[in-house]
Amino acid sequence: MATIRECAAKYLAELARRGASAHTLRNYGSDLEQLASYFELEMEQLDLALLREWLSALYDQKLSVVSVRRKLAAVRAMCKFLLTEKILAVNPAARLRTPKAKQRLPEVMSAEKTNNMLDAVERGEGLERPSRERDIAFLELLYGCGIRVSELVGIDLEDIDLRDGWLRVRGKGNKERQVPVAGRAVAAVERYLEQRPARPEERALFLNSRGGRLSDRQVRRLVKLYALMITGDSTVHPHSFRHAYATHLLADGADLRAIQELLGHARLSTTQKYTQVSLRDLQRVYDRAHPKA
């Protein structure tokens, strides 16, 4: 009989085959390894009572509800897969209760703050970096196309049509979509391509200093560096531009269904959180400006 660790490896291999991102594989691998290390059991021995014990241990570690929910999601998904593969006869996680997380709306950069940051990087104010043309190009794509960081680093040269202004994006589950590319982003990518090393064997659009594909960790580090140096805000990350993209489109009258398609959301409910962000911002304006507020 297979151990929990062996079953986790089998499930992660299946996720990789389905096209899961490196970020997802890393997080799920870490979560499932924690479960395997805690019990050191064969998978068949894992039952609801043991999972509740593990859940209690997670709370004892003072983990956030979001972290606990992610770990439970990884275990549930693995058990469901093992049930389908007939490795398990019953799903021990089926009746495991998920803790409720308080709904948090994303903090969204204003259009002014976003554009000021992009303009400052483009001008190179106090930022003498050899890869500035590359960096402004990927920043413009993050904001101009609303793509995820995993989607950004996955772009190949043939995925972007600069003449007609379209980008082919491979999203979650390897699902493809087409998104328009703004004029500023097109110009930034064109400038970068003039300096990009000629490496016929490497099809990635964005390259690191060694000539290989730029990683999502490198993009996160660079975004944080620029945000801290320009705005003094260390909380800005690549997904901040995706939030800004959706919220600014909605504020300017874009249809929610269209934004759903552009973002590649499977469910409209995921996109609807941006409606709440806009309402929250509207309330702030009202509170500041209305004499009876």
Image (cartoon, grey):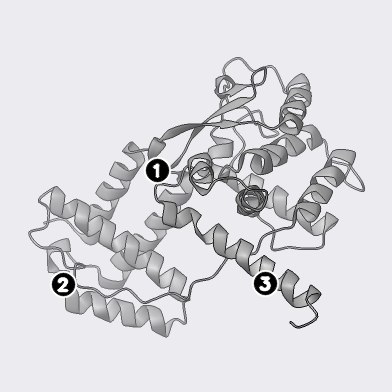
For the residue marked with disc 2, what is the amino acid?
A: Asp
Is residue 67 visible in this depiction of the protein? yes
- The disc at residue 20 is 1
Q: Is residue 5 visible?
A: no
Eye-nearest disc, 3 or 2 = 3
x and y percentages locating residue 273 in the rendered image: 52, 61
Amino acid type, residue under disc 3 in the picture = Gln
Q: Viewer-nearest of labels 3 and 1?
A: 3
Q: State left or right for residue 218 relative to residue 231.
A: left
Q: Secondary structure at mark 1?
A: loop
Tell me if 106 is positioned left or right of 116 in this view. left
* Image height of 120 relative to 235, above or below: above
- Residue drawn 12% across the image and 63% down it: 44
Position of 10 with respect to 169 (left or right) is left
Q: Residue at x 21, y 77 (%)?
A: 50
Where is the N terminus found, in terms of image quarters?
bottom left
Q: Residue 162 is drawn in which quadrant?
A: top right
* x and y percentages locating residue 216 in the rendered image: 58, 45
Disc number placed over residue 86 in the picture, else none:
none
Residue beneath disc 3:
283
Label 2: which residue?
A: 47
Near mark 2 (Cα within 10 A), the count class, few <14, some 14-19 or many ≥20, is few
Report helix, strand or loop for mark 3.
helix
Against 2, residue 291 (above or below) is below
Q: Residue at x 65, y 28 (%)?
A: 211
| Viewer-proximal residue among 182 and 285 | 285
* Percent coordinates x, y for residue 201 in the rendering: 57, 17
